[in-house]
Image: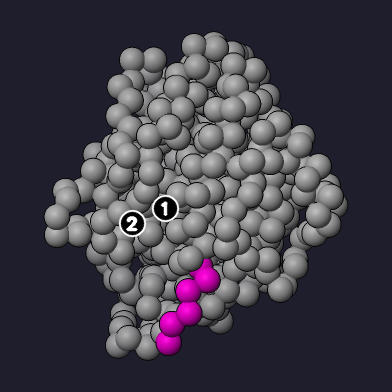
Amino acid sequence: MKKNFKVLICALTLLASVACKKDGKSTTAQVLNDHDTAFVHPGLLSTQASFDRMKTKVDSKVEPWLSGWNVLTANPHSSLTWSINPAPIIYRGSDGVHGENYSLLFNDVAAAYATAVRWKVSGDESYAKKSISIMNAWSSTLTRLAGSNDSILAAGLYGYEFANAGEIMRGYKGWSASDFALFQKMMLNIFYKVNHTFLTRTERCMSHYYANWDLCNMCSVLAIGVLCDDRDIYNEGISYFKYGPGNGAIKNAVYYIHPDGSGQWQESGRDQGHTMLGIALMGAFCEMAWSQGDDMFGYDDNRFLKGAEYVAKYNLMENVPFVSYSNCVGVNQTVISDASRGNSRPVWELVYNHYVKRKGLSAPYSARYAAKVRPEGGGGNYGSGSGGYDQLGYGTLTCTLE
């Protein structure tokens, strides 16, 4: 990328030039989409056109958008009375000394996103101010992520989610340039550094980690690249999706295509909760890239669709084929797992609406699962545990197309 282009982009985002400087950033050797254009803003899970559609439908009380909106407004995370609880150090996983406190972060991230969406659809600036107050509280307080190796999951999951909230609010006149730059700096120095270190790891057994470890960090890298107008960081995520050595890369995540055309998901022999999380994360990755004009949904003959249909069909209690899975640390799975089979996550509206409504393709099992879960909620609607906050949700509102 030309240096003067990066300077121009940072200048266009006011003080983002400060936030865009970082140490240890990689420039991928496989430059994949080094567009000579600025990023679309807002341009992650939702664009301005998406928000215009939501507002029009909700104002006109059209279903299913209205039901999706009602789930959002009923969720306490979207309330102006939400209590903000920033902490200087977030612990996920036991380090033998400190107790885990990462629920503070994932709850406030869910609130920052919910209030941001509520502002964009309603136009009520009190929700914009609430979202910004959450992000300012964390960017002025958080210093690091710690705990066990699970802190890598915190960096990935809450990194991509927080970046989405920030990306929605970046155009709000009430968010000062200095505060936005401080938020960008937090995302780069605390979240991206962990994401980058994990995705560029070198170890004998790259299949040691299940797909969702890579995928959440890939999502965070992609989202932070857009948030900070940094094409190199964005390309790092795209490159890993296509060519990465770990299980989050598309050909490893959907690691076997059966003769019937279905794609076996890498975690299918583990349990269905983690398998469905993988669909959530890859769906988010593809949608964020789509907002920037890059079609990862269709990559390798719609490989992600083949994986999503496989997972949806099995979790709708139908039989699917299975080939044994093994890796270099001794995992040997000879049958598909029925653990947590049929669970509900706000995953499927995004998949269904893209492949069926945008592209006109057949996705019968994703369509059935979307209908089963509709209207989708967000953080707090699927239990108090961390799994209910691993995806931002509200897909019936945000993803439903004509």
Residue 84 to residue 251: above or below: above
| Circle 1: element type | helix
Between 157 and 305, the residue placed more toward the observer is: 157
Tell me the residue at 57%/63% (across/down): 24
Tell me the residue at 33%/74% (across/down): 269
For the N terminus, which image quadrant?
A: bottom right
Residue 181 to residue 206: above or below: above
Name the quadrant containing residue 134: top left
Name the quadrant containing residue 231: bottom right
Between 204 and 208, the residue placed more toward the observer is: 204
Report whether 254 appears left or right of 391: right
Q: The disc labelled 1 sits on which kind of residue? A: Ala
What colour scheme governs how the chains and residues are painted in the rendered image of this protein?
one colour
Mark 2 sits on what residue? 151
Tell me the residue at 49%/11% (across/down): 126
Marks 1 and 2, how far apart in space?
6 Å
Estimate the x, y position of residue 22 in percent, counting from the top left: 59, 53
Extent of the magenta region: 199-204
Report whether 339 appears left or right of 363: left
Report whether 312 appears left or right of 18: left
Is the residue marked by circle 2 packed among few (<14), some (14-19), or many (20+) residues within 10 Å?
many
Q: Answer yes or no: is residue 247 visible.
A: yes
Q: The disc labelled 2 sits on which kind of residue? A: Ser
Q: Answer yes or no: is residue 297 visible.
A: no
Mark 1 sits on what residue? 155
Given contact means CB atoms under 8 Å apart, are the residues at marks 1 and 2 in contact? yes
- Magenta span includes 203: yes
